[in-house]
Structure formats: C-alpha cells, structure tokens
Image (spheres, rainbow, N blue to C red):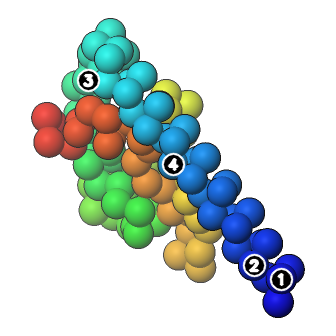
Amino acid sequence: MSETNELYTSVAYIKNKVDTLEKIELLRLRSDNVLKQRYLDILANANFRAVYKAVDGEKSQKEIATEIGKSEASISGYIKSLVEEGLLELIGVTSKGRIYNHTIVEQAYHLKRQL
C-alpha cells in the first residue's frame, strides 16, 4: 500500500511541476506581442484560418476536410504548417484518423475569438 501512496505522491508532484511550467509559458506568451502578431498574420490566410477554427480536439483531418470543402491532402499540409508554427498539436490517433487540438497559444492569445 505504501508503494501506491508513493506513486500517487510522485504523480501529484509531477503534475504540479507541469502545471507550474504551463503557467510560466502562458505568462511568457502573453508578454510577447510580436509573436501574437505573427500568429494573427498566419491566420489572416483564409485556408489556415478555416482549418484553425475547425480544429476542436475531436474531428479528424478527413472530417475537417469535408467540413471546409478542401481535399484531405491540402488540409494535411495546412495542419502540418500550423503544427510547425506551434498553433496546433497532435493529441491522438483514432480509428477516424489523426486528431489535433490547439496548443497553449490559444489559451494565451484567444486567437479563435479574434478571427
């Protein structure tokens, strides 16, 4: 039983550290107006904006392509670029396909509201 308690304590400690790092990253992002403007400039492109707005952490690339009316290959390219820029991240692979969600950048800048 003490091993279980030790494991629980270790997991709680790691979670606390990760939460602290996320808060620090949020503060850093919120103070970087140049980076915010860069992201807004990227999302000024209608295709990037449409993909960014369609991503919700549940839809697959194929579903996003259908929703937007673009080919799955083009959506894949847009998603790849948004991942490279730090706006989206892969959160899982399901039977539906790859699932993406917004990164901490969305929490820092609330970009979806500004689009």
Asked if the residue under mark 2 is in contact with the one under mark 3, i.e. CB atoms within 8 Å, the reply is no
Mark 4: amino acid: Asp
The residue where tag 1 is placed is: 2
Labelled disc at residue 19: 4
Residue depicted at x 78% and y 72%: 7
Picture layout, residue 26 above or below residue 62 = above
From mark 1 to mark 3, how far is it between C-alphas? 51 Å
Q: Quadrant of the N terminus?
A: bottom right
Residue 80 picture location, percent across and down: 54, 39
Q: Residue at x 54, y 38 (%)?
A: 21
**From this viewpoint, is residue 81 visible?**
no
Instruction: Give the residue at the far front of this rendering.
Output: 2
Q: Amino acid at mark 3?
A: Leu
To which residue does mark 2 refer? 5
> Please, what is the three-letter code of the amino acid marked with disc 1?
Ser
Q: Are marks 1 and 2 in contact (CB under 8 Å)?
A: yes
**Where does the image place residue 34, in percent across and percent down from the top left?**
32, 10
**Mark 3, residue position:** 40
Tell me if label 1 and label 4 are in contact, CB under 8 Å: no
What is the total number of numbered labels drawn onto the structure image?
A: 4
Q: 52 left or right of 72?
A: left
Is 77 left, or right, of 1 in this rendering?
Answer: left
Q: Position of residue 104 (x, y in %)?
A: 42, 41
Mark 2: amino acid: Asn
**Cα distance, mark 4 to mark 3?**
26 Å
- SS label for mark 4: helix
User: Which residue appears at 70% of the width and 67% of the height?
Assistant: 9
> Mark on residue 31?
none
3 or 2: tag closer to the N-terminus: 2
**Label 3: how many Cα within 10 Å (few below 14, some 14–19, many 20+):** some
